[in-house]
Amino acid sequence: MSKMFGQPIVRVEDDRLVRGHGAYLDDLGHDALAAAFVRSPHAHAEIVDIDVTGALDVEGLVAIYTYEDLPDRLAEPLPLLIPHPSLTHGRTQYALARDVVNHVGEPIVMVVARDRYLAEDAAERILVSYRPLPAVVGIDAARAAQHLVHKDVPGNVAANMMQSVGDVEAALRDAPHVLEFDLFIERSASTPMEGRGVLARWDPESHRLRLWTSTQTSTGVRAAVAAKLGLALVDVDVITPDVGGGFGVKIMHPWPEEVLVPWSAQLLGQPVKFTEDRREHFISSAHERAQQHHVRVGFDDDGHLLGLDVRFWHDHGAYTPYGLIVPIITSTQLVGPYKPGAYRVEFDSLYTNTVIVTPYRGAGRPQGVFVMERTMDAIAAELGIDRTVVRERNFIRPDEMPYDHGLVFQDGRPLIYDSGDYPTSLQKLKKLVGWDEFEAVRDTARAEGRRIGIGLGCYVEGTGVGPYEGGHVIVEPSGKVKVATGLTSQGQGHQTVFAQIVADELGVAMSDIEVVTGDTRRFGYAVGTFASRAAVMSGSAIMLAARAARAKALKIAADALEANPDDLEIVDGIVRVVGVPGAEISLGTVAVLSNPLRYAFDDAAKAATQFAVGDTGKPPVPED
Amino acid sequence: MAEEELHDVRLIVNGAARDVRVPARRLLSDCIRHDLKLTGTHVGCEHGVCGACTVLIDGTPMRSCLLLAVSVDGGAITTVEGLTEGDGTLSQVQQAFADCHGLQCGFCTPGFLTTITAGLLANPDPTEDDAREIIGGNLCRCTGYQNIVRSVLRAAEIERERAAT
């Protein structure tokens, strides 16, 4: 059998998706009640009164909830997912606003009705009275702190964090050249094609919650919901259906709706669904990016960095549920492929009356890369040196790997680069884009009245972060192989990639392998899908699981075939003795043998019952 | 408040007559997805910008999120589910998307498939520029469009191959 891994093959997912047979969140639960929310139109205001009387006679109305209805742990602020010692003033929101709203779009009232049209009818008849407060918008206003987002957070500063390597002040003092400048990065947003969404069914007879959510971490949502609703983890199933893009906004969890919808489903004894509409996504779902940087850089006559001092201000919006991950990534990935000399980076993470800021594609890295690359260009301009030359002179050389930056990365681990050949990459790049010939191209264009330019950026991406993922591989008596991993999929093609790995490791056809991701019923422990980690983490785990399954299968088959395991091969789901035609046993039968049977229920089992094969005196796997 | 008045509407969906009783304000996209349970048609922006909800009405691509179901009474609607041939064979556009890795998460895909199906009927032999023009009204967040452009050209090629056999 030819190797599947690395082959350009048609994706397993596509046949279903191009037929329109995908199953995204809002494709499920046609029988569910629908939730809609009254959201704040103010960036900052006190809630004076909520008058629901106008909504009460809307047909199809089932329930209206405000903060006062929330019990126990649901009435506490939502979790601060990633605490950090520097995050001295972390704040998270209530699932439904209590007394104060801190950004436009913050949910205040939840309405449940027969369908979404009626839920919106009721929502628009609910009158909320506000006393507007001064809104803090933008980094300048946050730093000025003339007004505070949270009364008990002085200066609007949630966190101040500093890391330094070497004596940056001395390096700058002694440097032949020093440049100082400010850089600004605007806000952006993930905006997947499919917004957020959650569907919950409570089964009172089995005391069990089943939750579908459009997320990048089903296990994270499960833990959060179980904690909020006071349920055991094993009583909560979270299933990630097809997800129409994540881009970071769906690694944030639990969203208010992710705890409110299952709570109401439990309370009402009926399935409840929330499907975020596009307007809600624009005003309520997380943003990213906005930062201001002040850079001081010292360098020698050849453009070698001697000292780099970066002070920046990060706008994290109204709350800090995702901790300091974004600015920590900015501050550590900023150095990129370069040796910065002495390096000091310090940031303030600031509150503003805007929607929360959580990771989005790059998760802080684009900001850091922008700062470093602008710095490289500034040095090149100052010295009149080609921009690629300045970069090359500052690269970490291949013979300096592994390279320890002396910084702590977002996962709390040291920032060490294991390998890399940046000079070769740059040479390839220059050739590819025709860097050295560009002057001539530009001159030609100018003569034609066209203005064209060229730029470059270099970066190192910290991917495949831990702490772990797991994989489960089981061979069924049919010979079909069922593979599960806990992290979720949102278009990466995991069902194809992981099946390729198992096909090679186990010796089975792709068509006999089914991969399930993001379903806690199939695999209960996982971190999530972000930072390009799925193939590295889950792919490796699944490979190891498949190897373990293979070793077990060969041991059992060797006993059954009275052969040496070393003489066996697995081809297309059949274990056979190399060079001995007919001496073979199917993986399905081996699967049954691994759990010896008294009863035959199909052909594979019949071949594996107690009178058919093996040494009944011993278990089929090695005894410890 | 009084129950909403309901209207009888007949839609010819993928060749079959479907009768529904809907309020006047029921969007065609919601009617297709939730009343007829044909969930291949997706709703991305709900204001006619992203193209994910595009269906063919009497052969013309239209945004089902901008149409009321009652306004299409008697109309012939083709959704993504209806592009597949009777024997289950993928249409040339569906096949091309699978061949060219024209999708990742797949959420926008149904709208591209219906739009391109109509586009290729009008222009069976598109250039690359034509292909870009055909998909100019649809948004995809995953692919960067390159493979979708290839898919348009490949679909035209498959159509020619199928016609030749």
Image: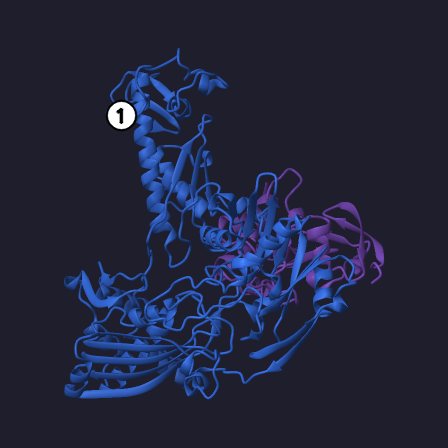
Q: Where does residue B56 sit, x and y in percent of width and height? A: 70, 56
Q: Is residue B127 visible?
A: no
x 41%, y 41%: residue: A499
x 23%, y 65%: residue: A422
Asked if residue B68 lies left or right of residue A343, the reply is right
The foreground one among A478 and B163 is A478
Q: Which chain does the residue under circle 1 lie in? A: A
- Chosen colour scheme: by chain
Colour chain B appears in? purple
Q: Where does residue A255 sit, x and y in percent of width and height? A: 52, 61
Asked if residue A306 lies left or right of residue A557, the reply is left
x 59%, y 61%: residue: A70
The relative height of residue B137 versus residue A158 in the rendered view (above or below) is above
Colour chain A appears in? blue
Q: Quadrant of residue B67?
A: bottom right
For the residue labelled by badge 1, is the local secondary structure a helix, a strand or a loop?
loop
Asked if residue A249 lies left or right of residue B22, the reply is left
Q: Is residue A354 visible?
A: yes
The foreground one among A392 and A78 is A78
Q: Quadrant of residue B4?
A: bottom right
Amino acid bearing label 1:
Glu
**Residue that lies at the very extreme toward the front in this rendered image:** A72
Q: Say which residue label 1 marks.
A: A623
